[in-house]
Image (tube, grey):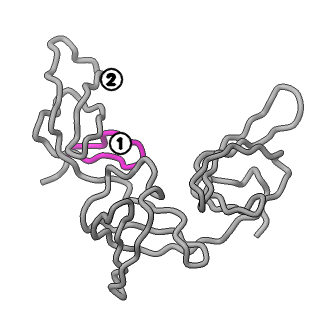
Amino acid sequence: MKQQANLIRAGQVIEHDGNRWTVLKQQIISPGKGGAFIQVEMRNLKTGNKTNERWRTADTVERLTTDNKEYTFSYMDGTNLVLMDPETFEELHVAADLMGDAAPFLQDQMTLELDLVEGEPVAIHLPASVVLEIVEADPVVKGQTAASSYKPALLSNGVKTLVPPFIETGERIVVRTEDGSYVERAKN
């Protein structure tokens, strides 16, 4: 279906120049002189190549409708994820590249949401947050009690993040999968 370019949002799938693209980022830019335009960073679904495209806000683009379906992550098979349909128990092999930066947060038996266009996977969405253990945290520096003082920590999945000073090595915390940021201590 056609939609105005200024309605493009991250996660949507569009058709442009005969190819299918998934939108990674979008930004509306209003220069001091002239009309506003939208800058879109997108990835080609077949080749994986990224590109930036600009449209005037009044231009139209072809948005593809996506179906959402839940799958359970089973295991990694080389560069593919093996997912299981919880209703039919059929396996689905999907390229791990669709995960993007969220790949380190993938956990066994995690429920994932797949966006499908005509039965073909185009995007994978993880839960909003996961529970991980701190394997290494810097000690607290005396006198550093300001509310905004966070210290670096290493999570069990190898991702570095910033945590409040009261968090110690070995504790389990809730982490946002979108950007790897600290949310709260995990409840036992």
Q: Which range is magenta?
A: 174-185
Between tags 1 and 2, which lies in front?
Answer: 1
Can you say which quadrant of the picture contains the C terminus? bottom left
Element at label 1: loop
Q: Name the residue under label 1.
A: 180
x and y percentages locating residue 182 in the rendered image:
30, 39
Tell whether 77 sits left or right of 18.
left
* Quadrant assignment, res 26: top right
**Is the residue 118 above or below the residue 179 in the image?**
below
Local packing at callout 2 (Cα closer than 10 Å; few below 14, some 14-19, many 20+) is: few
Q: Residue at x 64, y 53 (%)?
A: 9
Q: Name the residue under label 2.
A: 148
Tell whether 46 sits left or right of 177.
right
x and y percentages locating residue 171 in the rendered image:
13, 42
> First in sequence: mark 1 or mark 2?
2
**Is the residue 50 above or below the residue 126 in the image?**
above
Q: Most extreme residue toward the bottom, as rendered? A: 88
**Is the residue 166 above or below the residue 11 in the image?**
above
Can you say which quadrant of the picture contains the N terminus? bottom right
What amino acid is at disc 2? Ser
Tell whether 142 sits left or right of 65.
left
Q: Residue at x 35, y 39 (%)?
A: 181
x and y percentages locating residue 118 in the rendered image:
61, 78
Give whichever of 186, 53 is nearer the camera.
53
What amino acid is at disc 1? Gly
Give whichever of 124, 151 is nearer the camera.
124
